[in-house]
Amino acid sequence: GENVEQHPSTLSVQEGDSAVIKCTYSDSASNYFPWYKQELGKRPQLIIDIRSNVGEKKDQRIAVTLNKTAKHFSLHITETQPEDSAVYFCAAKRNTDKLIFGTGTRLQVFP
Amino acid sequence: GAVVSQHPSWVICKSGTSVKIECRSLDFQATTMFWYRQFPKQSLMLMATSNEGSKATYEQGVEKDKFLINHASLTLSTLTVTSAHPEDSSFYICSASEDLSYGYTFGSGTRLTVV
């Protein structure tokens, strides 16, 4: 089955800097890659996603890139703000199969 | 957008008792719902896939007799933790999707504490 690895486990940046979180997946047939943001004690919220037929997708300050050959995808957050502090999870799945999550990255943005 | 409601948001129960958690899709029909468990500072681990009108599919290592799942309608799935023990204390989250080829919408989660 699918296995998703995520790095780093923690990331601290200064406000205004960029943050990059990377994930690798094992199933080459996976074709959908969402990213979730989870604040403490709350539900995960979908922030951006990408399909395997696209190499990059951007939504304001966040972007996701996908390298199908290397089987990895990354989340990029530019101009970070304190409210970006949360745990971020990547995930992967194939078609309507179950969604498998990475181990999470705790992002801290210092003012 | 799709809304998933989950109740209760938190519950404290005594060891040996059972607890039922409800998950509802409010504005769409969900033939499939998913139940995840999350321990502190850990990832979301899929416990089981709940299918309307049929038996749930459990992940390896999850005891189906302990975590009873019922998906009796297109908008409601329930998870019952039977004979709860302190090690069952965790954050349980359900999720559903209008279109399973995309991502899921999560419920607000239930923090279970077994004393």
Image (cartoon, coloured by chain):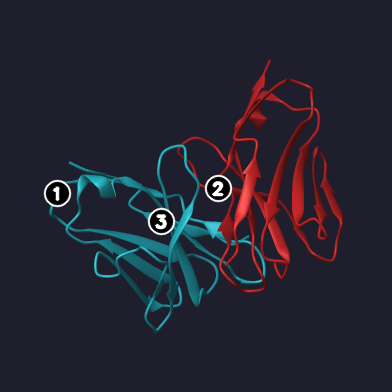
Chain colours: A red, B cyan
* Residue A97 screen position, x and y as percent: 59, 72
Residue flagged by tag 2: what amino acid is it?
Pro
In the rendered image, the residue lying farthest to the bottom is B53
Mark 3 and mark 2: Cα distance apart in space = 13 Å
Name the subunit of mark 1.
B
Q: Which residue is mark 1?
A: B15
Give the class, few, some or many, for how many residues have Cα within 10 Å of label 3's Cα (few <14, many ≥20): many
Left or right: residue B83 versus residue A12 is left
Residue flagged by tag 3: what amino acid is it?
Gln
Mark 2 and mark 1: Cα distance apart in space = 29 Å
Q: Report the front residue among B95 and A30.
A: A30
* Residue B60 screen position, x and y as percent: 40, 66
Q: Is residue B10 above or below residue B3?
A: above
* Mark 3, secondary structure of its residue: strand
Q: Which residue is mark 3?
A: B6
Q: Report the front residue among A6 and A111.
A: A6
* Residue A4 screen position, x and y as percent: 62, 54
Left or right: residue B76 versus residue A36 is left
Q: Which quadrant, please, contains the N terminus of chain A?
A: bottom right
Q: Report the front residue among A18 and B104.
A: A18
Q: Is residue A7 above or below residue A67?
A: above
* Mark 1, secondary structure of its residue: loop
